[in-house]
Each structure stands twice: as C-alpha cells, then as structure tokens.
Image: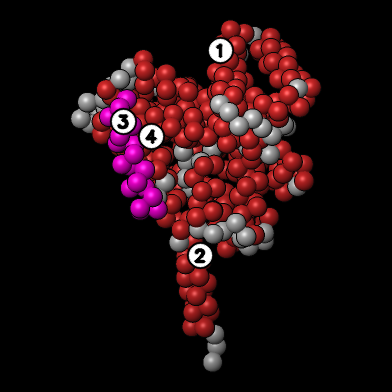
Amino acid sequence: MEGFIIALFVCLVLALISKYLSIPAIPLYILGGILLGKAGLGIVHLDDVSHFFSEIGLLFLLFFMGLELKLERIVANPTKVLTAGLIGLTVDMGIGFTGAYLLGFSLMEAFIVGAAFYITSTAIVVTSLIENRKLMFKETETIIWVTVFEDIILIIILALLSASDQILLLFFVKIALALAFMYAISFYGKEFLISVLDREDELPILFTFAAVLVTASFSLYLGIPETLMVIALGAALATTDPDAFEQHARPFKDVFLVMFFVFFGVTIDFSGGINWSIIAIICALAVLSKLISGMIIGLVIHNSAMSGLEIWANMISRGEFSIALAVLYGSPLIATTVAVLVIVTAIVGSFTAKYSTRLRSGIIHYGRKKALMHRPN
C-alpha cells in the first residue's frame, strides 16, 4: 500500500510538470515508474493492491475505447476511411514487423512490435489537436478517421492473440453470443439505462463501475478475454447515452490508468542485457513509418505532400494501447522495447504536433527560395 501512495504522489507532481511543459503525461508516468521501480531506486514494487488498480485502469481504458468507437464515421466516408486506414496498417505494421524480425525478434515478438508501431495514441492525438487549435484543419478529419480504423484493427488483433490457444470456432461463437446479449440489453433496456444515468445520486457512478467489473469477471468465467468484452460493453452502451457513461467512468479511468502507466514503468528492468542500439533503431523506424504512411495518405486523400506532413506530425505518438499489448502479450524484452518506444515517440510527437505549422511554412518558404534561385534571368 505504501508503494501505491508514493506512486500516486509522484503522479500528481508529474501531471503538474506535463501541464507546465505542455507535453503528454504518459511518457512522464512511465519514466516516474522506471525511476521508482526495478530499474531505478527500487522503492516501489508491484504488489496485489497496485496490480488490482492497474488492471482496473486498463479495463476502463478499453471501456472508453468502446464508447468512443464512432462507426458512423466509417459509414459516412467508407472509401476514404478504408483507404487511409489500410495505408497506415500496411506501412506502419509492415515496417514495424519487418524491422523487428530482421533485428532478431521472434515472429510473435515482431508481431507485437508491429502492432505497437501501428496503434497511435488516441488520447495524445485528440488532446494535441484540441490544445494546438487544429480541429478546423482539413487534415484533422482524416486523422480521426485513421484513429477509428486503428481502434477496429486493435480489436481484431486482440481477438487473434487471445484465440491462439483455443478452438477458433468455439471462441468466436462465444464472443458472438456475448455481443448479442450485451447489444440486446442496450437495445431493449435503453430507457431503463438512461433513467439510471439521469439520476443525481451515486447510482450512475456505481452502475458504471459495476458494469465494467462484472463484464470482465463474467467474460473470464466464459473463457473470453475480458479486454474484448469490456470494449464490446462500451460499444453497446454507446448506443444509449455515451456522454453520460463517459462522464461517470472518467474519474476511474483517469486515476487508475495513471497507476497502470506508473506500475508498467515499475516492472521495467534494464539489467537483462538490453541492446540499446536495437531499441534506438526501433524508435527511429517508428517515427519514419508514420512519416511514410502520413505522406502517402496526404497525397492520396488530399493530393498534398504538406497535408501528409501535417498528418505525420500529429500521429507520431504511440501510447496507451501499445503498452496494453505489451502488458497483455509481451515478454519483458518487448515491455522494455515498447516502453522506450512510447516515451520517445510521445515526446517527439508532442513537439512535431505543436510546431507543425512552422515546419510546413519553413518548407514552403525554402521551396520558393530554391525556385527563385533557379529561375532563369
């Protein structure tokens, strides 16, 4: 319990620092955990209490993902969404998987690294777009399309990884029945759910908290990954009143998810023969892959290289879902690699997103200057 209290206090300090410096808090929380844990001072350890709260943070992160899974965006612009999404999937995951495999990772490890390459941090991207006043940029809608597509692919990745040791047909039948049950409750019990959410007492918060934990427990009983079912719960409840559910679930997510990041950092151990050259190459490839996919998306969707540069600048950051994959399915080596990847890309991405307009203006000015220098007299 003492470790949890120390970690919570450190998180408060780090949150204030991140706001002051205008950088994402996620890499700071991981660094704080590394400093407090095995690789640092060794004063905080992962115990039953911290593990429980960290797991709750992961569950509410996935629940939020389900609530914010706006499928209507894909229905409204299916061609552009699929085009942009498939470009990102092919380029980012392809470069991540190939690079990791060639650098000596196993096939499964390379797959997880590739998935971590591909999944952008939705929290960092959306926050950055708002703070940098880019919601009216023409590229912003494309960025949102891509993140929604990534969320759907993440669900497929989780399903594939979770089904690796089960009979596939039975596994997907159980998932289908569980989904049908949740959507039936959301559809036929919509009025009841809304009446609960409209109350002014503690019932809406208790109901939201209980719904997430009961779903996770029930899914384990059925042999279905709780990660998938919690996402599905969020998607089902989003058909009722998603704003109300987000409001009541946000306190749990914000507090416990911070613990998830910190104690992820606590478990990182750099004493196991970490090859920093390989990790540095992985981080460089992660930034490069988003540049390539962003430029291609910009040229295909907006017919503009400058739009591609803007998309790249705002989508470099990896974060919460990359870490979730490492925690759920990765080895200690993968956890360390992904931790450094998230820290580097989140910090680099925060600066590229903030100064992308200046970067674009500088490139345009340089291009015009070069054109004038080569203009015949």
Instruction: Give the position of the C terminus as an image quadrant.
Output: bottom right
Identify the amino acid type marked 1: Ser
Point 36% across, 18% down: residue: 49
Residue corresponding to mark 3: 7
Q: Earlier in the sequence, mark 4 or mark 1?
A: 1
Q: Give the spatial CA distance, label 4 vs label 3.
A: 18 Å
Give the image location of residue 198, x and y in percent: 66, 32
Q: Are marks 4 and 2 in contact (CB under 8 Å)?
A: no
- Secondary element at tag 4: helix
Residue corresponding to mark 4: 339
Q: Residue 217: which disc?
A: 1
Q: Give the spatial CA distance, label 1 vs label 2.
A: 47 Å
- Secondary element at tag 1: helix
Point 43% across, 52% down: residue: 350
Q: Earlier in the sequence, mark 3 or mark 2?
A: 3
Q: Give the spatial CA distance, label 1 vs label 3.
A: 27 Å
- The image quarter in which residue 214 lies: top right
Query: Which residue sits furthest front?
Result: 201
Q: Are marks 1 and 2 in contact (CB under 8 Å)?
A: no
Q: Are marks 4 and 3 in contact (CB under 8 Å)?
A: no
Identify the amino acid type marked 3: Ala
Q: Nearer the viewer, residue 233 or 167?
A: 233
- The magenta stretch is 4-22
- Density class for disc 2 (Cα within 10 Å; few <14, some 14-19, many ≥20) is some
Q: Give the spatial CA distance, label 4 vs label 2.
A: 29 Å
Q: Earlier in the sequence, mark 4 or mark 2?
A: 4
- Secondary element at tag 2: helix
Q: Nearer the viewer, residue 149 or 178?
A: 178
In this rendering, the answer to whether 151 lies above or below 349 is: above
Q: Residue 357: which disc?
A: 2
Identify the amino acid type marked 4: Ala
Point 54% across, 59% down: residue: 133
